[in-house]
Image (cartoon, rainbow, N blue to C red):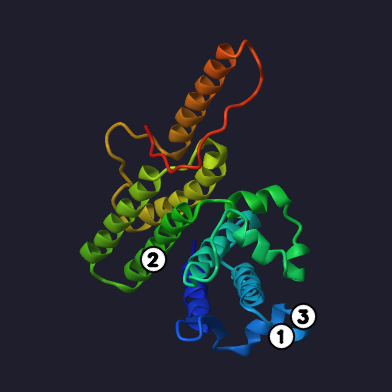
């Protein structure tokens, strides 16, 4: 992750504003209408989709950001989830992000598979919020460490990132989505680890008994498999999978 990528997130924040009086989004720069039909975004969903496409393409234009498109898409989705949650009139359910973006013809033309796109978009908003806070924490650390001659202040921002990372592990998703969740979190952690090496920042530590994201996901999947196996034995070997409640379990 580069300082330029973080600046693009800051810029889009200035230009896409939720007006609490009218309870609608507005553009402070009409260029963001570029990704709407006839360059006119007629409702909030179209505005959000156009802003998302603008941010994603701005990410791709950064010369120093030679990273895969899937990762850039993940980070743009995190910003979009944050922006959606500013509007109390939009019900945030599992399909909300995808339903908004599929209205945008430019987004529909992206070559990435539907599975890759929908995995990240299907997270509960709590998980998206935690991931976005971690992303912003990394950006704040980049800005502080690159602009500051005070290494102690730089270290303090690194410690804040450690707290944000722990929050992402402590509030952990259910087995169905923990693999794509860990893909996003691992990408963010890898970005932080590069900063750690560059600026001698503190390591991202977890409370005793917790593994990294992939380790927690493996434990969750094994526990789910045990539940399925026990359920199948109790009904005489049927392959029917028990339904799990859509809860927000923490890691074990």
Q: Nearer the viewer, residue 194 or 250?
A: 250
Question: Which SS class for mark 2?
Answer: helix
> Mark 3 — residue?
37
Question: Which SS class for mark 3?
Answer: helix
Mark 2 to mark 1: distance in Å? Answer: 35 Å
| Badge 2 vs badge 1, beta-carbon distance below 8 Å | no
Q: Look at discs 2 and 3 and give the one toward the viewer.
A: 3
Mark 2 to mark 3: distance in Å? Answer: 37 Å
Residue at the image position 38 percent from the left and 39 percent from the top: 250
Q: Nearer the viewer, residue 17 or 203?
A: 17
Image quadrant where residue 232 sits: top right
Image quadrant where residue 195 sits: bottom left
The disc, 2 or 1, on the residue closer to the chain's N-terminal end is 1
Residue at the image position 62 percent from the left and 10 percent from the top: 236
| Badge 2 vs badge 3, beta-carbon distance below 8 Å | no
Question: Which SS class for mark 1?
Answer: loop
Q: Residues within 10 Å of mark 1 (few under 14, many from 20)?
A: some
In the image: residue 235, left or right of residue 142: right
Q: Look at discs 2 and 1 and give the one toward the viewer.
A: 1
| Badge 3 vs badge 1, beta-carbon distance below 8 Å | yes
Q: Position of residue 171 (x, y in %)?
A: 39, 45
Position of 93 relative to 243 (above/below): below
> Mark 2 — residue?
142
> Mark 1 — residue?
40
Q: Quadrant of the C terminus?
A: top left
In the image: residue 230, left or right of residue 154: right
Mark 3 to mark 1: distance in Å? Answer: 6 Å
In the image: residue 82, left or right of residue 55: left
């Amino acid at each position: 992750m580069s300082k330029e990528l973080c600046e693009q997130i800051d810029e889009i924040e200035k230009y896409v504003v939720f007006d609490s009086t009218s309870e609608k989004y507005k553009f402070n720069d009409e260029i963001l209408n570029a990704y709407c039909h006839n360059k006119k975004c007629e409702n909030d969903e179209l505005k959000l989709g156009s802003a998302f496409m603008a941010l994603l393409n701005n990410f791709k234009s950064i010369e120093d950001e030679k990273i895969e498109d899937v990762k850039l898409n993940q980070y743009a989705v995190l910003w979009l989830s944050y922006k959606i949650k500013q509007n109390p009139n939009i019900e945030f359910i599992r399909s909300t992000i995808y339903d908004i973006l599929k209205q945008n013809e430019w987004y529909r033309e992206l070559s990435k598979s539907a599975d890759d796109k929908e995995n990240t978009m299907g997270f509960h908003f709590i998980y998206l919020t935690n991931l976005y806070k971690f992303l912003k924490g990394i950006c704040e650390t980049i800005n502080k460490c690159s602009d500051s001659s005070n290494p102690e202040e730089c270290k303090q921002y690194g410690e804040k990132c450690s707290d944000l990372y722990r929050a992402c592990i402590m509030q952990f998703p259910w087995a169905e989505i923990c693999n794509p969740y860990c893909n996003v979190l691992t990408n963010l952690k890898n970005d932080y680890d590069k900063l750690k090496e560059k600026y001698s920042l503190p390591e991202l530590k977890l409370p005793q008994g917790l593994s990294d994201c992939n380790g927690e996901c493996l434990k969750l999947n094994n526990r789910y498999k045990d539940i399925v196996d026990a359920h199948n034995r109790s009904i005489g070997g049927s392959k029917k999978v028990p339904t799990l409640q859509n809860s927000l379990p923490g890691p074990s």
